[in-house]
Image (spheres, helix red, strand yellow):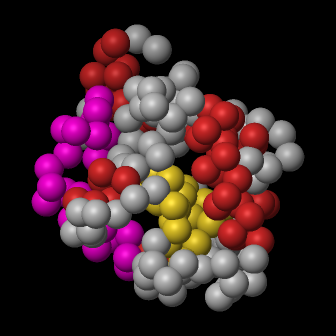
Amino acid sequence: MLKLDLEAAKDATIPDVLPAGGEPFRVMFAGINPGLYSAATGWHFARPGNRFWPALYAAGFTDRLLKPSEQGELARYGLGITNIAPRATAQGAELTPDELRQGGERLTALVADRRPGIVAILGVTAYRTAFARPKAVIGPQPGPLGPARLWILPNPSGLNASWQLPRLAEAFRELRDAAQEPEGEGETQ
């Protein structure tokens, strides 16, 4: 991808990828915001080195490794993708706390409208700011986000060196297992 293409993607937005209304919706994954590579291609988690798609497959959410360009296939698995903040940046750190809080409000409204079983936010630091939960940790959260159970996953960016693919896939697998449990079972109090 040419540098010019990436520069042109700054501040762009990309559409959510969600199952059609009325279709099963097990898990809504919420990234922090689109990176420039994703905004330039229109595909979520598109930058080479991002581990979202490999972790999704390794955890058993999909029966094969999907490419970012195949993001439309997620609906058949009952999965969807959105972002907390819609504005594309080179790094999530470029977002203001106010943008994250506004994104949290937008995400809450989207969850109320689309009603996924679980919302999985990919990035604990962004979640802490967006939802004023400074002590939140990775894993299931004690309270819901609207009608959905809430789970925090590590950011799958290749820049998140402390979460290599095997460890990341295990965190995704725990979420997948929880998504298969009937509501109310396995919740933490």
Horizontal side of 24 relative to 127 (left or right) equals right
Using the image, determine if residue 167 lies above or below residue 28: above
Q: Residue at x 28, y 40 (%)?
A: 92
In the image, residue 16 lies at what x, y percent? 50, 57
Horizontal side of 173 relative to 162 (left or right) equals right
Using the image, determine if residue 44 lies above or below residue 85: above
The quadrant holding residue 106 is bottom left
Look at the magenta stretch and give its main secondary structure: helix
- Residue 174 highlighted magenta (yes or no): no
Q: Residue furthest right?
A: 63
Q: Residue furthest front?
A: 189
- Number of marks in the image? 0
Horizontal side of 94 relative to 41 (left or right) equals left
Q: Nearer the viewer, residue 168 or 110?
A: 168
Horizontal side of 12 relative to 159 (left or right) equals left
The quadrant holding residue 21 is bottom right
Q: Nearer the viewer, residue 136 or 55?
A: 136
Residue 40 in view (yes/no): no
- Residue 94 highlighted magenta (yes or no): yes
In the image, residue 43 lies at what x, y percent? 54, 39
In the image, residue 167 lies at what x, y percent? 61, 38
Using the image, determine if residue 184 lies above or below residue 50: below
Q: Which residues are magenta?
A: 86-109
Q: Residue furthest top?
A: 2
Q: Nearer the viewer, residue 37 or 171?
A: 171
In the image, residue 49 lies at what x, y percent? 54, 23
Q: Residue at x 45, y 43 (%)?
A: 155
Residue 172 in view (yes/no): yes
